[in-house]
């Protein structure tokens, strides 16, 4: 931290946390932005992230990325990045099929591990990742970033304070429309999310994983699920082979569930909701009140309090920009909003704080494994047309 005392410049030196980023696509950009901005708005952190190295198989791409974001060096082989002595933390922003191998190797090398969601393609891979970081006792976290939006964090505080009372219902959806095109290929670097081998699943692991993580954070564990999935375009061109092949990822998924606290849940996700680019909402209904939130207006949390006088009773909109509200004391003056990208700044700040204190940075790998268990149960329920218990290890 830098300050001025009289005419003398005082510099308080921070500890360095040297970051090695693997993958330089969209999520690599969001993470890099978080690393670069965190020190400007969270000046009291003891650690400063240093963008030491970035890795991608494409040398032209990784050089351009390193220059744009200010990484000191680059690699084209992730194993070389992990083996470097000047890397403290490895951030995994690759397709899902690479998460396990990189995370296990990074943990074995004694590196802290940050992993983009979902944790893995399946429970078997996720279990190996949890075992690796816990055996090596390295700090770890998964980028379920929506927890760090101030309005969502405020919802967590209100639920925990008992303002909603006993919870009866939790409903959520995440809707997009970018795959409504039968000419889109499956596979390749641009469309790996359309490839079951690379992604593991479709909307379940991509979009519903966010819904499930938030639901369990806000409302507790999920006991069992009953799901249905659909593939609307049955065959697509495989980019690598030039042949038409069956599509194996889910385009849409709907499931309902029982939470451990006795409440009911309703979840919906699709990439076939024309007109919706990223509609992500949740609503919680309790005995004393309700909450609802919409990503399209992410600084607003709506709250209904049944204890209000009837003459003024109704939904109120809380504009979450005040310094007393989560994270907002670090930003602008009340009334001025922040955006999606700030959730990553907040997660970086929380991770750096956890490095300083030694506490866990949630969600960690074990937390994300619980989300993976629900995703697995959802897919098996849809396949077998039955209720599925989330505590069952479906791989055995």
Image: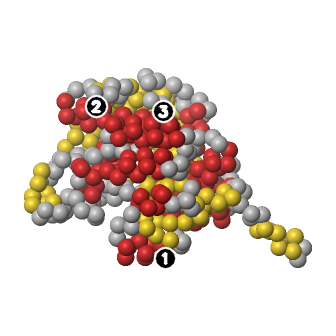
Tell me: residue 224, above or below residue 197. above
Identity of the residue drawn at 41% across and 71% down: 62
Front-most of residues 33 and 95: 95
- Cα separation, mark 2 vs mark 3, equals 27 Å
Per the image, the residue denoted by label 1 is 67
x, y percent for residue 141: 51, 46
The answer to whether 63 is drawn above or below residue 26 in the figure is below
Q: Look at discs 3 and 1 and give the one toward the viewer.
A: 1
Residue to which mark 2 is pinned: 395
Give the distance between the C-alpha atoms of the residues marked 3 and 1, in whole angstroms: 43 Å
Helix, strand or loop for disc 3: helix
Tell which of 52 and 110 is nearer to you: 110
> Which of the two labelled residues, at mark 3 and mark 1, occupies the earlier sequence position?
1
- Circle 1 packing at 10 Å, graded few (<14), some (14-19), many (20+), is few
* Residue 147 in the figure: left or right of residue 179: right
Residue 220 at least partly seen:
yes
Q: Quadrant of the C terminus?
A: top left
């Amino acid at each position: 931290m830098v300050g001025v005392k009289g005419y003398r410049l005082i510099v308080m030196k921070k500890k360095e946390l040297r970051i090695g980023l693997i993958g330089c696509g969209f999520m690599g950009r969001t993470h890099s932005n978080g690393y670069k901005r965190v020190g400007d708005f969270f000046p009291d952190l003891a650690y400063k992230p240093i963008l030491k190295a970035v890795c991608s198989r494409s040398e032209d791409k990784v050089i351009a990325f390193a220059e744009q974001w200010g990484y000191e060096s680059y690699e084209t082989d992730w194993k070389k990045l992990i083996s470097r002595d000047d890397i403290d933390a490895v951030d995994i922003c690759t397709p899902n099929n690479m998460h396990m191998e990189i995370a296990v190797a990074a943990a074995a090398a004694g590196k802290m591990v940050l992993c983009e969601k979902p944790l893995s393609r399946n429970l078997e891979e996720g279990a190996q990742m949890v075992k690796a970081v816990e055996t090596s006792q390295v700090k770890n976290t998964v980028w379920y970033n929506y927890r760090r939006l101030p309005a969502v964090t405020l919802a967590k505080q209100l639920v925990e304070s008992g303002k909603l009372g006993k919870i009866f219902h939790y409903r959520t959806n995440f809707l997009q429309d970018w795959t409504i095109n039968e000419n889109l290929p499956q596979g390749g670097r641009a469309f790996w999310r359309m490839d079951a081998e690379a992604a593991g699943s479709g909307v379940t692991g991509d979009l519903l994983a966010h819904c499930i993580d938030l639901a369990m954070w806000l409302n507790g564990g999920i006991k069992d699920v009953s799901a249905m999935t659909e593939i609307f375009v049955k065959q697509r061109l495989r980019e690598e082979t030039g042949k038409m092949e069956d599509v194996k990822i889910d385009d849409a998924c709907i499931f309902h569930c029982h939470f451990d606290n006795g409440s009911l849940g309703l979840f919906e996700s699709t990439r076939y909701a024309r007109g919706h680019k990223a509609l992500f909402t949740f609503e919680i209904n309790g005995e004393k009140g309700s909450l609802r939130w919409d990503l399209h207006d992410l600084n607003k949390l709506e709250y209904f309090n049944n204890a209000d006088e009837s003459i003024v009773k109704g939904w109120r909109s809380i504009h979450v920009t005040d310094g007393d509200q989560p994270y907002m004391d670090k930003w602008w003056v009340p009334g001025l909003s922040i955006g999606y990208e700030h959730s990553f700044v907040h997660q970086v700040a929380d991770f750096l704080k956890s490095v300083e204190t030694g506490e866990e940075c949630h969600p960690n790998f074990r937390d994300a494994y619980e989300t993976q268990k629900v995703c697995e149960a959802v897919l098996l329920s849809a396949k077998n047309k039955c209720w599925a218990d989330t505590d069952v290890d479906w791989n055995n």
